[in-house]
Image (cartoon, rainbow, N blue to C red):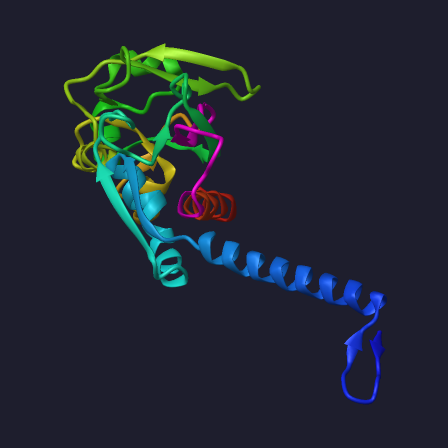
Amino acid sequence: LVNRPPRKLTLTAAGEKVLQKTRTLSQISQEIEDQSVKDLPSGTLRVACAHFTAMQIIAPVLPDLLQRYPQLRIELDVNNHPVSLVGERIDVAIRITDNPEPGMIARRLGECRSVLCASPHYLASRGVPEQLEDLARHNCLHYSFFAGQSWRFLTPEGEPITTAVSGNLSASISSLLMEAAINHCGIAMLPEREADAALRQGSLVPVLSAFTPKPIGIFGIYQSRDYQPAAQRVFLDALANHLATRSD
């Protein structure tokens, strides 16, 4: 690789080739290092979500995520009505829906399972429904942003079925409906994550357990598939892992 004349060392042709390859490898190594720095999650990630989603799905992942990536800043826009990603400069929206909006990228992160429940006092005074048809005689607390007042279930055989319901209270916040149910106002269909403590304490009890409320998808919705910032990717990965490892 090296010529060894008396006064000066020079590279042979083979040595020149080795040197060139070494320089190339060094450049590649530096490019990889530079790219890895660029790929570290950083900057502000604007996230739109509903109140339940913020408290029950996003909040549990934030401590670890923000500690792991100190250059990352998450800004939550908590609104129980869908907002325009473009108009509100939202990077990603986390939505519980069966129909993600067209024209957007929708990454499925998991599903939201619900439970039909009421307080023991309400059931003692109004009777315990035994069939879905019995719900027509009960005060059903429902979400105001759903089109129409109907609840969707899966039968014991797994067949979908829909039943119309009515009641004197609707709201866009599930925690409000839960408090109303705990205080004997009626029967509510609540996310299992939110109702879990009240069910364990006995302030709410399941109703019509043979029929399973139809699960609804949880999606991360964003505008472009061409380039996904590292901050957005690790945020969605964290939510998907959380939903996969925690039993609803």
Q: Residue at x 33, y 14 (%)?
A: 134
Left or right of 107, for residue 92: left
Give the camera-side residue of 20 and 31: 20
Q: Position of residue 82 (x, y in %)?
A: 26, 25
Q: Residue at x 31, y 16 (%)?
A: 135
Q: Position of residue 42 (x, y in %)?
A: 36, 53
User: Which residue is farthest bottom?
Assistant: 6
For residue 86, above or below residue 46: above
Location of residue 12 by image quarter: bottom right
Quadrant of image for the N terminus: bottom right
Q: Position of residue 144 (x, y in %)?
A: 21, 20
Left or right of 99, for residue 19: right
Quadrant of image for the C terminus: top left
Q: Residue at x 40, y 21 (%)?
A: 100
Give the camera-side residue of 106 and 20: 20
Q: Is residue 120 magenta?
A: no
**Span shown in magenta:** 210-232
Viewer can see residue 38: yes
For residue 111, above or below residue 244: above
Q: Is residue 229 magenta?
A: yes
For residue 47, above or below residue 160: below
User: Which residue is farthest front?
Assistant: 7
Q: Position of residue 167 (x, y in %)?
A: 19, 17
Viewer can see residue 196: no
Give the camera-side residue of 211 and 238: 238
Left or right of 5, for residue 72: left
For residue 118, above or below residue 139: below
Give the camera-side residue of 247 and 54: 54
Location of residue 168 by image quarter: top left
